[in-house]
Amino acid sequence: MKPPNFFSELKRRNVYKVAIAYAVVAWLLLQAASILFPTFEAPPWTMKVFVAVIALGFPIALVFAWAFELTPEGIKRTESADKLPKKPARGRAWIYVVVIPGAISASLFFLGRYTSSKQSEGSELPAKSIAVLPFENLSHDPENAYFADGIQEEILTRLAKIADLKVISRTSTQHYKSAPENLPEIAKQLGVANILEGSVQKAGDAVRVNVKLIQAASDSHLWADIYDRKLTDIFAVESEIAKAVADTLQAKLTGSELHAIAARPTENTEAHQLYLKGRFFWNKRTGNDLKKSVDYFN
C-alpha cells in the first residue's frame, strides 16, 4: 500500500482521533494519579506500574481503532462496518472527548504543581527546625572566647535531645558569624526556619548571657532574654534557654527529655571550665591545639 493511501486509511478509520483522545485521557489519568496516590500513601512502585500500563495500552488502542469501528449496531470489524448504511457523522463529538479531559488535565497539572511547591517549601524549612550560631564573646578578655564557644555548644546539645526539634549540628554552623546580616540566606543554606543568636560576657564569677530566637524568613524575633547569673548557675541558664526555645517553637517534650535538658554534668565549676577549654582547643584540630586540649582534659 502506498504511503498516501495508508495515511488516508488511518484517517478514515479514525486512528488519528483515537491516538489524540487516548493521549489526552492518559494525561488526565496520570495527573489524577500523581495527586491521589500520595494522598492515600500508595507505595512508590504503584505509579511506575500505572505509567507502564498506560504506555502499553497506547499501541493496543491504535490497533483496536484500525481493526474495529463503533457503529449504531455496536462494535464491528472495520470490513463489516463498511458494508453498513452510512449515517451522518457527528464530527464534533470526538472534539468534546478531547477538550473536556484536556481542560481537566490542565487543572490537575497546575493543582499538582501548586501542592508540590507548598510541600517542598515545608520540607525545606520545617517549622520546628533551628540552628544555633556561634555565640559572640563580649568579655574584655579575648581568652574567654572558650566560654562563649562552650555555652553555644552545650545549649545546642540540650536542644538536640528534643526529638520534636530538628537541630543543625555545630559542624555546619561554626563557620558563620555570631550575628550575620544575611540571616534568611544562611537559614536557607542550613535548611532551618529559626536561628538562635547569642552573646556571652564573663567577668570573674559573674556571667551575662544574651539570647535571641529569630524566625529567619521574616527576620522577626520570636523570643529574647538576658540572663545575669553566677558562674555556678550556668547549667541552669543553659537548661532554661533550651526549655524556652522548645516552648516557643511548640515542641513536645517527654519526661525523659525534660530531665535530659535539665541535667548538670558536674558540680565542680573549675572542672567544667577546664573541660570547656579542652573542647575549645579540640575543635581547632591543629597539632598544638590538640595537645593543649589533652592537658585541659587531664
Image (cartoon, rainbow, N blue to C red):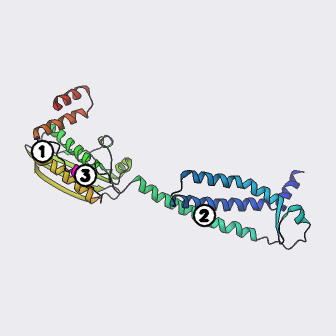
From the viewer's side, name the closer residue of 44 and 29. 44
For marks 2 and 1, give the CA distance. 63 Å
Q: Is 277 placed left or right of 6 in the picture?
A: left
Q: Amino acid at mark 3?
A: Ser
Q: Which mark is residue 202?
A: 1
Residue 32 drawn at (x, y percent): 59, 62
Q: Is 68 placed left or right of 100 in the picture?
A: right
Neighbours of disc 3 within 10 Å: few (<14), some (14-19), many (20+):
few
Outermost front residue? 255
Mark 2 element type: helix
Which residue is painted at 38% across and 47% down in the image? 189
Mark 1 element type: strand
Residue 84 drawn at (x, y percent): 90, 69
Neighbours of disc 2 within 10 Å: few (<14), some (14-19), many (20+):
some
| Residue identifier under label 3 | 256
- Residues drawn in magenta: 258-268
Q: Is 150 placed left or right of 70 in the picture?
A: left
